[in-house]
């Protein structure tokens, strides 16, 4: 549940962190949408290859259209996941689409996945897990003054201790 900007910390409707069920649902939606997004390019390429073999336009191929529709559905799922859980948990899961697409391409498109490709897939999955496990707690904005402060002083500004 998100708190409206301008509400004080003690008022009703105060910001609460999402519960375990909401986090589980949001992460599940993020993983599924990542897998759907990873399959889209493989389906589209498969449709293009099929259409080229038949001598027709890829726009008439159902596999290409299923890849395009899957891309839209995957992005909608990703958007829903961003609304359910903090961004620092959802963003690393987007990288899971790369290994899934690579593995799917090796089966559907008969592409060869060499040892470096397999290692890259493994590192991508491991990196996503490490980023999620060590993600920082996100701060909620409770007042309009805090919102204005965050907008005027971004966290990635040049206020580094090394530059002072």
Image: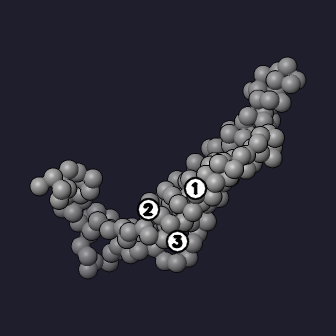
What residue sits 26% from the left and 56% below the top?
Answer: 155
Between label 3 and label 2, give the one nearer the viewer.
2
What residue sits 54% from the left and 66% below the top?
Answer: 129
Residue 117 at x, y = what percent?
A: 66, 48
Circle 2 residues within 10 Å: few <14, some 14–19, many ≥20: some
Q: Quadrant of residue 134?
A: bottom left
Residue bearing mark 1: 124
Dot placed on the residue nearer the N-terminal end, 3 or 1: 3
Say whether marks 3 and 1 touch (CB < 8 Å): no
What residue sits 49% from the left and 77% below the top?
Answer: 19
Q: Is residue 69 something one can see in this rendering?
A: no
The Cα atoms of the two marked residues, 2 and 1, are separated by: 16 Å
Quadrant of the drawing holding the C terminus: bottom left
- Taking depth in this image into account, of 12 and 137 the one nearest to the observer is 137
The Cα atoms of the two marked residues, 3 and 1, are separated by: 22 Å
Residue bearing mark 3: 23
Q: Is residue 13 left or right of residue 159?
A: right
Residue 99 at x, y = what percent?
A: 65, 52
* Residue 130 higher or lower than 68, as above or below: below
Residue 88 numbered tag? 2
Dot placed on the residue nearer the N-terminal end, 2 or 1: 2
Dot placed on the residue nearer the N-terminal end, 3 or 2: 3
Residue 62 at x, y = what percent?
A: 80, 35
């Amino acid at each position: 549940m998100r708190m409206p900007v301008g509400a004080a910390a003690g008022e009703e409707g105060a910001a609460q962190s999402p519960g375990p069920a909401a986090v589980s649902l949001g992460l599940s939606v993020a993983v599924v949408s990542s897998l759907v997004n990873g399959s889209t390019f493989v389906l589209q390429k498969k449709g293009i290859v099929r259409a080229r073999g038949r001598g027709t336009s890829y726009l008439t191929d159902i596999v290409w259209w299923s890849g395009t529709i899957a891309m839209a559905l995957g992005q909608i799922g990703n958007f829903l996941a961003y609304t359910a859980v903090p961004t620092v948990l959802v963003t690393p899961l987007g990288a899971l689409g790369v290994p899934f697409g690579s593995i799917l391409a090796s089966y559907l498109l008969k592409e060869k996945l060499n040892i470096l490709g397999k290692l890259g897939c493994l590192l991508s999955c491991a990196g996503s897990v490490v980023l999620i496990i060590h993600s920082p707690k996100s701060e909620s904005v409770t007042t309009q003054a805090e919102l204005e402060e965050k907008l005027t002083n971004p966290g990635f500004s040049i206020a580094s201790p090394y530059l002072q």
